[in-house]
Amino acid sequence: MQTQSLSSNPSDVDKATAILSAGGLVAFPTETVYGLGADARNGQAVARVYAAKGRPVFNPLIVHVADLDAAQQYAVFDDLALMIAAQFWPGPLSLVLPLAKNHGLSELVTAGLDNVAIRIPQHPVAQALLQRFDGPLAAPSANPSGRISPTNAAHVLGDMSGKIDAVLDGGACNVGLESTILKVDGSGVSLLRAGGVPVEDVEAVLGHSIAMPSDPETPQSPGQLQSHYAPDAQVRLNVSVPKDDEVLLGFGPNDKGATLNLSPTGDLVEAAANLFGHLREMDALAQHNIAVSPIPMSGLGLAINDRLKRAAAPRD
């Protein structure tokens, strides 16, 4: 298979739409990372996503839709879910909600669960594609399962060329971390994955704190596998002084000797946007392992530390 490289102009969005309608796979940009899109109603297309990524079939996928009316075709929204959606959609937040009756989604999307993870992306190219396709797209990150997520089209082509039909190039992702995932049910709101919306922002809207993420044996949402987002090199966290065989991924103004710095000014938004790209650059220094400076556990730092913890986890 030859992977087409498409631009974000309307004619190429039409080409991408035609590929998706025929059951093909198209990587496309969101504000978080590039997603690998397939028609979420087409079981064969969704199976191709799992095959292209080498993704475990028990790991559910996020469904991307253009607007709230579309989301309500596939998930049941109570008043609390509607309030959260009104505050954070479109944007880097996914909601895990009960499946709607007659939803029509492939069971592979939900990994056999009775709920679905769904979101409305804000990236203009993602919106153009979803509106033109006029249907739900299952879209995990467009990279081999467990590896570093892609934040530009070149990352996708480097990882997935020959495995997918096309890449829709919309430039670099401005958030650079996957979406925050919240489960909303009769017991309230729980955090399944920290991500592009800081937990503090959610808590401010709710008026109370929410539980931090856990790592269940069977994932309830994407991003809950212990080893994930991993480079080839070994990763060591919270390092002040790197070893001789390590390169340092720094953070803040004091890490002047770092090989790369996530944010020389200590800006967590900048650090989040740079995280996956910098990990890829560090991983290219194949003779070295990666040491990472401490990152504050507040704001987007919670999501950054979550990704780094999984990148450093023991691998099967």
Image (cartoon, rainbow, N blue to C red):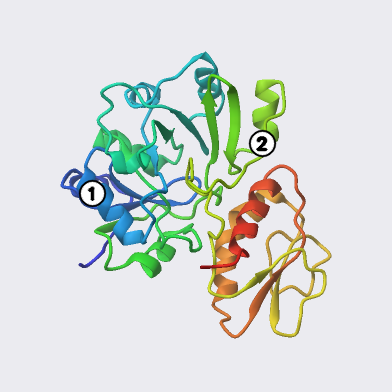
Closer to the camera in the image, 101 or 168: 101
Residue that carries the numbered disc 1 in the rendered image:
45
Please tell me which residue is depicted at 40% across the width and 23% down the height of the picture.
68
Residue 122 versus residue 98 in the image, above or below? below
Question: Image quadrant of residue 315?
Answer: bottom right
Residue 222 versus residue 148 in the image, above or below? above
Mark 2 and 1 residues: CB-CB less than 8 Å, in contact?
no
Please tell me which residue is depicted at 56% across the width and 72% down the height of the picture.
281
Residue that carries the numbered disc 2 in the rendered image:
199
Question: Image quadrant of residue 117?
Answer: top left
Residue 14 visible? The answer is no
Residue 143 versus residue 15 in the image, above or below? below
Residue 74 versus residue 264 in the image, above or below? above
Amino acid residing under circle 2 = Val
Please tell me which residue is depicted at 56% across the width and 74% down the height of the picture.
283
Q: Position of residue 206 (x, y in %)?
A: 66, 22
Q: How many marks?
A: 2
Asked if residue 215 lies left or right of residue 239, the reply is left
Closer to the camera in the image, 108 or 239: 108
Please tell me which residue is depicted at 36% across the width and 33% down the height of the picture.
65
Closer to the camera in the image, 187 or 311: 187
Q: Position of residue 156 (x, y in %)?
A: 39, 62
Badge 2 element: helix
